[in-house]
Amino acid sequence: MAKTHSEIKLFHLHGTKDGVVSVAHITEPYGEGSEPVVSIGISLKGNALDPEWKVHIPYENIDDLIEALELAKKEFGKDYVPSEHATPLDNEEGIGGD
């Protein structure tokens, strides 16, 4: 099967004039036989097909990613104000997966 790109969702990137976030399903992203991924792209120029930044997430890691995003939103959402006793994020505690 050849590499295919199927758009899942496209939305405006908050805080930018033309920025977009694109979420897509990609088959064989690294060549024949490679596992499909979800691709998350960010374009400040509004070009969803050629984003300046992108990350490929294996489907096996989506639940971990969602959990991390929900935790980030809960703990550090837009109304977050760091306390004097905040734990630095550079510690290795809690990093990892299954």
Image (cartoon, rainbow, N blue to C red):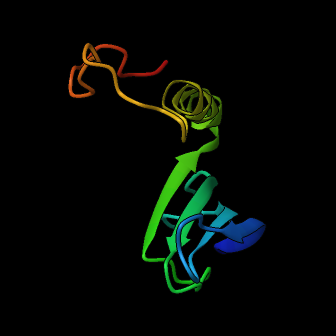
Identify the residue shown where x is 61% and y is 26%: 67
Q: Quadrant of the N terminus?
A: bottom right
Q: Position of residue 2 (x, y in %)?
A: 67, 75
Residue 64: name its quadrant: top right
Q: Is residue 69 above or below residue 26?
A: above
Identify the residue shown where x is 27% and y is 17%: 87
Q: Is residue 97 above or below residue 28?
A: above
Q: Nearer the viewer, residue 15 or 72?
A: 15
Q: Nearer the viewer, residue 94 or 30?
A: 94
Q: Is residue 79 above or below residue 45?
A: above
Q: Nearer the viewer, residue 28 or 10?
A: 10
Q: Position of residue 22 (x, y in %)?
A: 65, 68
Residue 36: name its quadrant: bottom right
Residue 9: name its quadrant: bottom right
Is 85 situated left or right of 96 in this image?
left
Q: How many marks?
A: 0
Q: Position of residue 26 (x, y in %)?
A: 65, 64
Q: Position of residue 71 (x, y in %)?
A: 56, 25
Identify the residue shown where x is 38% and y is 22%: 96
Is 94 situated left or right of 7 in this image?
left
- Can residue 16 be seen here? The reply is yes
Identify the residue shown where x is 54% and y is 36%: 79
- Can residue 32 be seen here? The reply is no
Q: Nearer the viewer, residue 58 or 50?
A: 50
Is 84 situated left or right of 27 in this image?
left
